[in-house]
Image (cartoon, helix red, strand yellow):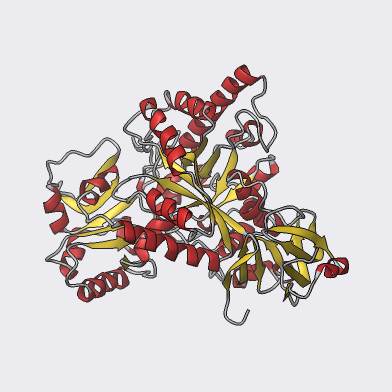
Amino acid sequence: MHADLLFTGGPVLTPEGRTGTAVAVTGDRVTAVGREEVHDLAGPRTEVVDLAGRLLMPGFQDAHVHPVPAGLELSRCDLTGARTADETLAAVRAYADAHPGREWITGGGWSMEAFEGGTPTKELLDAVVPDRPVYLPNRDHHGAWVNSRALALAGITRDTPDPADGRIDRDVSGEPSGTLQEGAMQLVGRLTPPATPADLTAALLHAQRHLHALGITAWQDALVGDFLGMEDPAQAYLAAARDGSLTARVVGALWWDRERGAEQIPELVERRAALSHGRFRAGSVKLMLDGVAETGTAALLDPYLDKCGCATANRGTSFIDAGQLPEYVTELDALGFQCHFHALGDRAVRDALDAIEAARAASEARWGSPRPKAGGGPSDTRPHLAHLQVVQPADVPRFARLGATANIQPLWAAHEPQMDELTIPFLGPERAAWQYPFGALLRSGARLAAGSDWPVSSPDPLQGIHVAVNRVPPDGGGTPVFLPGERIGLAEALSAYTAGSAYVNHLDDTGEVRAGALADLVVLDRDPFDGPMEAIAETRVSLTYVGGTRVYAAPGA
């Protein structure tokens, strides 16, 4: 039986290493992996791709990403390219001038390090957009910058109390200064014009094209629901899955409303059934346990420090009560839901692990086994913890013991202003050394998956792999290595972005190049194993295939 597609003439990354030089694909699956003998499967209608020494590998999978908000942001006031306050304000002014009919100026992606203390003021925005409300989430989307017009429309004054899950930043006189943290974002965000269904679908497809160009064939959308003014992408996914325009394989993590409790679980069961169709499955639940370290909202076991290095009264914010979390996770696990935790601070990480341990104990009581083998069975729910900025060393070995996957965002594990100016001084040297412990987790036997959190940071897996291996930014020549003991090897980093994320996504027929697997494949423009590790980020994607169908080709590829 002749193959439909034959790759030849280059290294092939298989579970055993770079062991092959040829791969045959028939229909949507890999049918043979080997060397010259695979060439016998070529027929008169076989498409032959000459790798010419380039590496063929499994398609990348992003285990934590927000494509629809990213696509929307790209079509609005996109500030991701601005590095200084002046550049950011110039971009806002240019967008406002180019869109005089827009009722609101929305978009986002500004960098906290561009502004003193990471909190720009309303007066800066008033100077460039005085006549219309402005609402711009920052790069990590845990805070928003607003102008005076937006604050007035929302009725936010010096007398407005902080919401339970957020903070209104204030100046020395007590007046709102122009930034809203966490749940306070919604005070203004709920007033912004909602995107139309057509907008959301267009944003999804725009994002999908971009992700395919980066070699990404599958992902887990880390927030399917309404949250802080971000529109629910569920119907866009469902429409694209039904009409075939969703070419990626996607898992949707349904949003856990942190203002409610277990009473929402029946609704999640209904949403899972209603939304799962074709290449989109809504079998995960996103539980956001805390905020981010830069704003002092990541949940820590011990207090943050102040600028003088003294302990404060602030231990961050826990959005879900730690006493009730084990109950929620146990019930979700029993119903077959995967739990996808946002956990940055060491208290949030411990709370998540404690909840998983409770669910495992309950599973053992029900089924006689807390951890069935991968591939099926009771409680094969594959919980994972995303971000993992600060992890107590005592909690590192618990990941392997509990079968909890460490979902890492490698781009953040480097010296850059947000780390050096807004994080390390407020953690102190001991906790700062516990950040992003990729190497320690791997050495302890933990499974690693990887993602980007785009639009928080670049979705390019090769940039993330560069940082995971080198612990310096992709463009950080001369930057000191950030915690060199936590570097991991290239093979391990690639595995996190392929087999590790495929495991998290329950896509057991993907993540590896082997006979019988789905032909979700990527051709790189070189073999990064043959070059210096310092040059990994220079690697580009030439071709991307999903189920044997080409979904991206670089110019000249």
The x and y percentages for residue 318 are: 38, 34
Residue under the point 33% across and 35% down: 313
Which residue is at the far bottom?
A: 556
Figure quadrant of residue 361:
top right
Near-viewer residue (504 or 457) = 504
> Is 276 placed left or right of 520 in the picture?
left
The x and y percentages for residue 38 are: 84, 66
Which residue is at the far right?
A: 37
The x and y percentages for residue 278 are: 52, 50
Whether residue 261 is situated above or below residue 150 in the rendered picture = above
> Is 251 placed left or right of 550 in the picture?
left
Whether residue 421 is situated above or below residue 100 in the rendered picture = above
Query: Is residue 286 in sight in this rendering?
Result: no
Near-viewer residue (318 or 336) = 336
Figure quadrant of residue 86:
bottom left
The x and y percentages for residue 218 are: 56, 55
Near-viewer residue (169 or 337) = 337
> Is 255 placed left or right of 212 in the picture?
left
Q: Which quarter of the rendered picture does the C terminus lie within? A: bottom right
Whether residue 325 is situated above or below residue 283 in the rendered picture = above
Near-viewer residue (551 or 145) = 551
Whether residue 224 is situated above or below residue 397 in the rendered picture = below
Residue under the point 64% across and 25% down: 370
> Is 267 placed left or right of 393 in the picture?
left
Tally the numbered discs. 0
Query: Is residue 265 in sight in this rendering?
Result: yes
Q: Which quarter of the rendered picture does the N terminus lie within? A: bottom right
